[in-house]
Image (cartoon, helix red, strand yellow):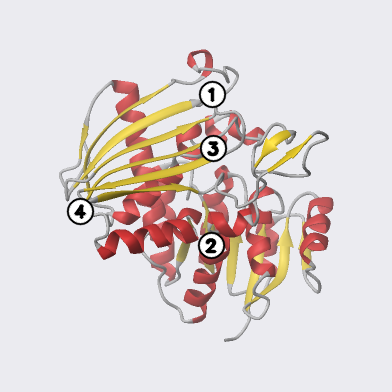
Amino acid sequence: MKQIKILLTGAAFAADLHADAYSRMRDKAKIVAIADKAADRIEKLANTYGFTDFKAFDDYKKAIMETDCDVVDICLPNFLHHDAAVTALSQGRDVICEKPLATTVEDAYDIINTAEKYGRRVYYAEDWLGSPALRKAREIIDSGAIGDLTFVRARECHCGSHSPFAQKIKYCGGGCMVHLGVHPVGFMLALKNNKWKELVALTSGGGENNLIHRGMEGEDWAGALMRFEDGTTAVLEANYVTSGGMEDVIDFYGTKGCLHTDLTFSSALKGFSIPGFDYTVEKAEVTTGWANPAVDEKYNLGYVSEIGHFLDCIANQKDADVGLRGIDGYETLKVINLIYKSAREGIKIINNGLEAK
């Protein structure tokens, strides 16, 4: 397999997650350019993962126009996803895009249409689908070990986004549901091939109505109940009011058993520290006392498998698995916006297969 030439746009938090994965598969991936307005972030990222012989740009559009690459990996703030994707696709490049695909459904639809127009592919970076634990859980469910799946409860929660762009809806598209709930929503849609029947939701409302983060325009708590075409039901939650580190917990209930999955606190390590560990788990406010330090957090959350799958797909010019395609990012964003509509208007949303009302 030839090395896939990658232009990495962004050099901050999301880019670090992808860069770690690329660094583990140097036989498949070559970082040929990194674009970020902060030169020191590019330098730090390159030094951390040993990237050399690449071009540095302070403007992602310039980088896209001038870089000879196979794929543009978009790890920019949410509100830049659409512009970067459309620019790359129109230049004949495939695209890997971090979640959410865009900040509006209209922009997400435009990305999908642009890809089709230019005969390119969009790979949607939903890391839960690469998680070894969740992949094993799906194998167990498919084997019939817990009978017919009837109910799923899934949540991603932590104490609040570190990004200044997360404070304004115009920059991010919403609150905790679009930032964190995008994972349980996207996972369930992938599990059920985007075939859902109805949903109803509540959120904290944003601003002064929030539980804790009253300076944030978007909501800091959100929950949705969904029913899928095959009758499976799900409770999906996201919040910014959870202390102690990020919680990624998914429970599966079947007619003959159940499965409980914890992606972030299931470390084989347990320790006690008076001065504090260097690191325990993402978003943990303190590292003193008893803790379960993550062993290989980025791998266990699914980023390595996700990126590896994309590289194989790009090399063979084929679509990604269900849940990891651009269309899946679009369907996920549609559902999230309907969750907001349900909460805002106090209504149940019915999906009749043609249009959700």
Mark 4 or mark 3: which is in front? Answer: 4
Q: Which quadrant of the figure has residue 326? A: bottom left
Looking at the rendered structure, the secondary structure element under dot 3 is helix
Residue type pointed to by label 3: Cys
Q: Which badge, 4 or 3, comes first in the chain's sequence? A: 4
Q: Earlier in the sequence, mark 1 or mark 4?
A: 4
Q: Identity of the amino acid at label 2?
A: Ile
Residue 350 visible = yes
Task: Please tell me which of labels 3 and 2 falls first in the chain.
Answer: 2
Q: Label 4: which residue?
A: 148
Residue designated by label 1 = 217
Q: Position of residue 93 (x, y in %)?
A: 54, 70
Near mark 4 (Cα within 10 A), the count class, few <14, some 14-19 or many ≥20, is some
- Disc 3 and disc 2 in contact, CB within 8 angstroms: no
Kindly identify the residue that appears in the image at 54 percent across and 23 percent down.
217
Q: Spatial distance from mark 1 to mark 4, Cα to Cα? A: 41 Å
In x, y percent, where is residue 9? Answer: 66, 58
Residue 128 percent across, percent down from the top left: 47, 54
